[in-house]
Image (tube, helix red, strand yellow):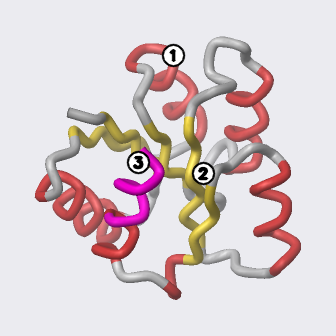
Amino acid sequence: MKKILLVEDDPFLIEIYTTKFKQAGFIVDVVENGEQCLKRVSEDKPDVLILDIVLPDMDGWGVLKEIKKNSQFKDMKVIILSNLGEKGEIEKGINLGAVRYFVKAHYAPSEIVEEVKKIL
């Protein structure tokens, strides 16, 4: 089974996405801030990281930069799932190394699950 690390601080979204991914056969782990994410990535090495941008402590941009500069994790698939939907933010995410950038309001959770399946 493929392992997902979901980095999200909204309890409602955590519950929805965790349920949807588990129903689709994924192992799901959740952390709520950037510092926890970096610690968990080094411990568990998930197949894909689903990363929000607006987070307590270290934001998603900081997390993405740290992951991509570490040779151990530079090939990890990172998908941004954020409410920040400006063209500049989307371009920034892709330029920093995310494989996809999804604006939460534009996709149903089930659509995100299907997109993650395609990426993996």
Residue 6 got which mark?
3
Question: Does 68 appear in magenta?
Answer: no
Which structural element holds mark 1? Answer: helix
Other-residue count near label 2 (Cα within 10 Å), few / some / many at <14 / 14–19 / ≥20: few
Residue at the image position 59 percent from the left and 40 percent from the top: 34
Other-residue count near label 3 (Cα within 10 Å), few / some / many at <14 / 14–19 / ≥20: many
Q: Mark 1 = which residue?
A: 42
Magenta highlight range: 114-120
Quarter of the image where the N terminus is located: top left
Q: Earlier in the sequence, mark 2 or mark 3?
A: 3
Quarter of the image where the C terminus is located: top left
Picture layout, residue 44 above or below residue 18: above
Q: Amino acid at mark 3?
A: Leu
Which structural element holds mark 2? Answer: loop
Q: Mark 2 = which residue?
A: 56
Q: Amino acid at mark 1?
A: Ser
Residue in the foreground of this view, choosing between 4 and 14: 4
Residue at the image position 68 percent from the left and 42 percent from the top: 58
Q: Earlier in the sequence, mark 1 or mark 3?
A: 3
Looking at the image, residue 74 sits to the left or right of residue 52; the answer is right
Marks 2 and 3 sit apart, C-alpha to C-alpha, by: 14 Å
Residue in the foreground of this view, choosing between 113 and 11: 113
Q: How many marks?
A: 3
Q: Earlier in the sequence, mark 1 or mark 2?
A: 1
| Front disc: 1 or 2 | 1
Looking at the image, residue 33 sits to the left or right of residue 84; the answer is left
Residue 118 got which mark?
none
Other-residue count near label 1 (Cα within 10 Å), few / some / many at <14 / 14–19 / ≥20: few
Marks 1 and 2 sit apart, C-alpha to C-alpha, by: 20 Å
Q: Position of residue 45 (x, y in %)?
A: 44, 21
